[in-house]
Amino acid sequence: MALVGKLEVTIKINRLPTEVTTDKNGWKEFLVDFGKRGARVSLRPRMWNRLEQAANTHPHWIAVITGQMGDDVQKGVFKLLEPNLQVFEYTPKTPGAEAKPDASKAPDGKAEGSAPTAAPEKADEKQAASPPGE
């Protein structure tokens, strides 16, 4: 007998979708393209408002949409079932913040002229006595 599992999909977006349709209940539906595959996502009005608010208030944000992979709605496009949305603000990394190599280190990463040293023992830590030899 095969093991039963559940397939969950995580979709990350950082822009507000432009081609959005609204159904009679106010749900917003849009397509996310992954290259060879795609997903049709339907969000409740409250979730869509959180997405719009992030796009309007934060210069850099990312939305994580999770859900179960549903049936194909067209070739290569599946419907995302039970979507959940989380929105995060982030600060982009600056290219100048990368660690610069230390000039005093040799090419192998070790400091020149240094010998390996043992870690200093803690003063308050007592070492157990070794058992007497027979």
Image (cartoon, rainbow, N blue to C red):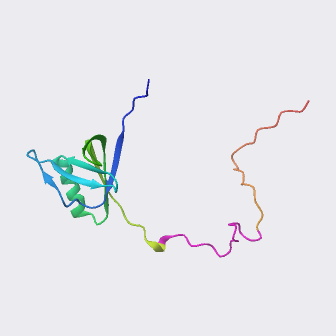
At a point 22% along the width and 59% down the height, the residue shown is 17
At a point 35% along the width and 41% down the height, the residue shown is 8
Quarter in which the N terminus is drawn? top left
At a point 71% along the width and 69% down the height, the residue shown is 111
In the rendered structure, the answer to whether residue 59 lies left or right of residue 103 reads left
Q: Is residue 89 above or below residue 6?
A: below
Which residue is farthest bottom? 103
Q: Is residue 108 above or below residue 103?
A: above
Q: Is residue 69 above or below residue 57?
A: above
Which residue is farthest right? 134
Q: Of 39 and 118, which appears nearest the observer?
A: 39
Residue 59 x %, y %: 28, 66
Q: Of 7 and 71, which appears nearest the observer?
A: 71
In the rendered structure, the answer to whether residue 129 lies left or right of residue 58 reads right
Q: Of 89 and 122, which appears nearest the observer?
A: 89
Residue 123 x %, y %: 70, 50
Quadrant of the image occupied by residue 63: bottom left
Q: What is the magenta range?
A: 97-113
Quarter in which the C terminus is drawn? top right
Magenta segment's dominant SS is loop
Quadrant of the image occupied by residue 90: bottom left
- Please tell me whether residue 111 belongs to the stretch shown in magenta: yes
Label count reads: 0
In the rendered structure, the answer to whether residue 113 lies left or right of residue 27 reads right
Q: Is residue 111 above or below residue 34?
A: below
Which residue is farthest left? 24
Residue 13 x %, y %: 31, 57
At a point 56% along the width and 73% down the height, the residue shown is 100
In the rendered structure, the answer to whether residue 111 lies left or right of residue 18 reads right
- Please tell me whether residue 95 belongs to the stretch shown in magenta: no
Residue 94 x %, y %: 43, 71
